[in-house]
Amino acid sequence: FERYETWMRDALPRAEAIQADAGAPTSLTGVFPADRQEGLCRSLAARAGLEASNFRLDRSTHPFCGGTPTDVRITTRYNERDPAQALMGVLHEAGHGLYERGLPSAFARQPVGQAAGMAAHESQSLIMEMQSCRSDAFLRWLGPELHGTFGGEAAAYDPQNLRRLWRRVERGFIRVDADEMTYPAHVILRFRLEIALIGGDLQVADLPGAWRDGLQGLLGIVPPDDARGCLQDIHWYDGLFGYFPSYTLGAMGAAQLMAAARREVSGLDDAIGRGDLQPLVRWLRSQVHEQGNRLGFNDLLTHATGKRLDPSDFETHLTSRYLSALPLH
């Protein structure tokens, strides 16, 4: 985390400057009917490998994935002014569902047949959403699909515009709304505070002030109230101390896995550019899903990528995506 914080302090202002020079993207305007969004979400889930015979998609206030390996249940929410929320939410949860779907059935209900922890689980959701489906290759395919589904100005669906619209860095107060470059800062803040709370170095009464100071130190912004500060998450109130790091460890693992998949799967980006996620899913099935819980997260990454968790692939991914004017991945 200290390494990433140092890297981010240098990279974030540069990414913001590049973004400002590029100008504001064209917003998607009009109404995006929920039923059409749902149809597209089902199509995307099928492309990821969730067959209708063992998959349900329903609506809820917040997206989540549940069910069993043979009965995957996903929910999402529909914003009729912004289809990205539902689409990317379903793709994220599909990553979780595919992991559960691919666990070794011979060891179902046994510890070795379970997932290898939440960092591993988050790596599977983020490799689908962030690494694959926000990539230039996928957006080149998705733009015409969106235009065909919803109509409107074709320029708004241009892949370059979607890239600028859906891949923006912005310093914000809310973790769940953060972009992939600033999201780890929200995790680092929470991790440091929970260590201080557990160690007795921070009293609960002092948490709001410590939160404000910590966020200012990391991102240079101060939340105007506790709703956008220390009260925004449910994790601590639910007893989930030590959970937050799994999100960023998962993001780093996803970048590492994607780099390995690109090395090992011929034509992977070409397939993703056709909307075909199956080559990636097949590789993940053999390298990650079918391993179950016989390996810890670091050993699982070593098995799949040849090395333990290494933030360099995540930094390389962010550099390519946000600090370069060249075609991105």
Image (tube, rainbow, N blue to C red):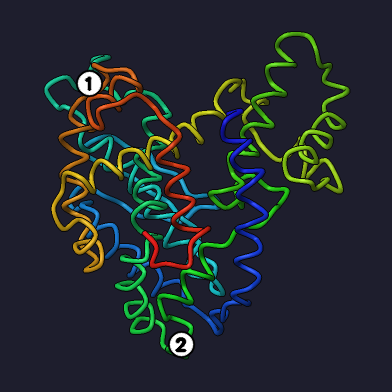
Residue flagged by tag 1: what amino acid is it?
Answer: Gly
Numbered circle sitting on residue 181: none
Q: Residue sitting at 63 percent across and 35 percent down?
A: 5
Label 1 neighbourhood size at 10 Å, few (<14), some (14-19), many (20+)?
many
Of 184 and 49, the residue lying toward us: 184
Disc count in the image? 2
Q: Secondary structure at mark 2?
A: helix
Q: Secondary structure at mark 1?
A: helix
Q: CA distance from mark 1 to mark 2?
A: 47 Å
Q: Residue 245 in the image: x percent, y percent?
A: 54, 28
Instruction: Residue under label 2, please give it.
Output: 155
Q: Residue sitting at 61 percent across and 52 percent down?
A: 177
Instruction: Residue under label 1, please give it.
Output: 113
State whether residue 4 is above or below residue 50.
above
Q: Quadrant of the C terminus?
A: bottom left
Horizontal placement of 167 versus 104: left or right?
Answer: right
| Residue extending farthest top | 199
Of 145 and 52, the residue lying toward us: 145
Badge 1 or badge 2: first in the primary sequence: 1
State whether residue 73 is above or below residue 301.
below
Q: Quadrant of the N terminus?
A: top right
Residue flagged by tag 2: what amino acid is it?
Answer: Ala
Closer mark to the observer between disc 1 and disc 2 = 2
Label 2 neighbourhood size at 10 Å, few (<14), some (14-19), many (20+)?
some
Q: Are marks 1 and 2 in contact (CB under 8 Å)?
A: no
Q: Quadrant of residue 208?
A: top right
Q: Residue 243 in the image: x percent, y percent?
A: 54, 25
Horizontal placement of 108 versus 128: left or right?
Answer: left
Q: Residue 325 in the image: x percent, y percent?
A: 48, 67
Horizontal placement of 138 versus 203: left or right?
Answer: left
Of 42 and 203, the residue lying toward us: 203
